[in-house]
Image (spheres, helix red, strand yellow):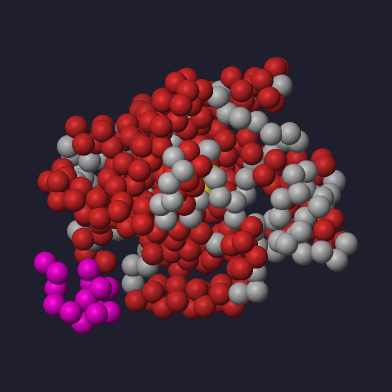
Amino acid sequence: MRIRRGAAISTTIVDTARRRRAVSAFAAGWLAIAVAVLLFGWTPTWTALTVPTDQPLFSDMRSVQGAVEAVHHGLNPQVVNPADPWHRTMDYPMVWERIAELLHFEVEADYLSFEIVLVLVFLASVAGMVWWAPSWWLVAASFSSSTLLLVERGNNDLAVFSLVWLAQAVPLAAGLGILFVAALLKLYPVLCWPAMIRTRGTLILAVVLGAALLLLLQDELAAIHKAQPLRAYLSYGSSSFSYAFKVIGHVTVPGLLISAVLVLVSLGALVLFAGHIRFVQDGRFEARRRVFYAGAFVFLGTFMLGSNWDYRLVFLLFCVPLLATLESPLFRRMLLAILLVALNHSAFGTWFGLAGYAVNELAKGVLFVLLAAVTTMVLVQDDVVLRLWHRLTLLPKLR
């Protein structure tokens, strides 16, 4: 199948009834949440859904709202941000302060309007994914604790997720341009860039854009890194595991060591499950693979690089369309079930207490191992990746 040059998302026909049921369930569920918020209030609704709430509403972006006042007083909000309700520094690039100025975030109604638009665009993006690759696994993931937390907090990952999804629907060069904008907003979307590198031209473009990104943000990187919080609750990543070991077990285990161990274990998993990592090969396989790359690279990369709030696990939704086509029913169900457990930190903690939290954290580690193994196998079987590798290294063929 030839898709519009470089675009991953195609309009290949799928079962209409299945698509209609999946999209209807998604829409009905989120409409019910919206109605519940209007009828019963913000905190009661999210609490009933096991999502911890903060006040004021859409709390995560309040640091950006406060940044406007900080700048007006001659302060750098990445260093000190007294107008934030919790006095948090703004751990985002300064472009967000300029957006806040432009859209008048200091006016509460304008701030809330922006957040509502962000949520609606995000939900439209997820609905588009459900429409494109309908499955009940994807619908379940779209109502996970991580997805709900992202909406409740109103974090700007809402915008990044939507941009990454949009990048899959356009030609490669345009997609890289969109991901460049996403990286200007949040940095970590650079992890998605390899998903768009399918030709020498896109490789050169990625290098140029990477240099431009470093040039634009070089003076902010240290402040952004320093402002990143370290935590274990509602979080994932090697650094989160390390912090949990230190706080709960009073044992010091470096995050780098945890990452190294998980990578080694994933190599063992690759050997063990290699025969099970086979996918349905149809006209949509290439599209599903590229979308998978975006989600897998974000999850694996952010896991190894630091501590991340659980709402960033929403990028695992990009992995579901491909994983749902694994030919091995047992491996497919096992992997997707682990993915769903990993997505539901607050739900498992609310329902099962400390045991639930422990199961969730274990699932995150196991998911890293299995997804790293699957990603490695997918890359090894990707002819485009192999051709680029051969051209870059001038080494003999790998297979």
Q: Residue shown at 40%/72% (left/top)?
A: 202
Q: Position of residue 147 (x, y in %)?
A: 52, 36
Extreme residue toward the right, this view: 73
Give coordinates of residue 356: x percent, y percent.
43, 26
Q: How many marks?
A: 0
Residue at (27% x, 66% y) in the render? 385
Where is 343 relative to 349, above or below?
below
Q: Is residue 275 highlighted in magenta?
A: no
Q: Note whether residue 115 is visible.
A: yes
Relative to 292, 387 lies left or right: left
For this view, does 88 lie left or right of residue 314?
A: right
Residue at image position (71%, 50%) is 88
The structure residue drawn at horizontal position 31% and vertical position 51%, both measured from the top left corner, is 262
Which corner quadrant holds the C terminus?
A: bottom left
Quarter of the view holding residue 112: top right
Residue 200 lies, with reference to residue 193, above or below; the image says below
How far across and down, in percent of the image, does residue 226 sit?
A: 62, 61
Residue 375 visible in image: no
Instruction: Place residue 52 in its image quadrant.
Output: top right
**Relative vertical location of residue 193 with respect to residue 106 in this rendering, above or below:** below
| Magenta stretch bounds | 386-399
> What is the x, y in percent for residue 92?
64, 58
Quarter the N terminus occupies: bottom left
Left or right: 369 as drawn, with respect to 93: left
Which residue occupies the extreme bottom position in the image?
394
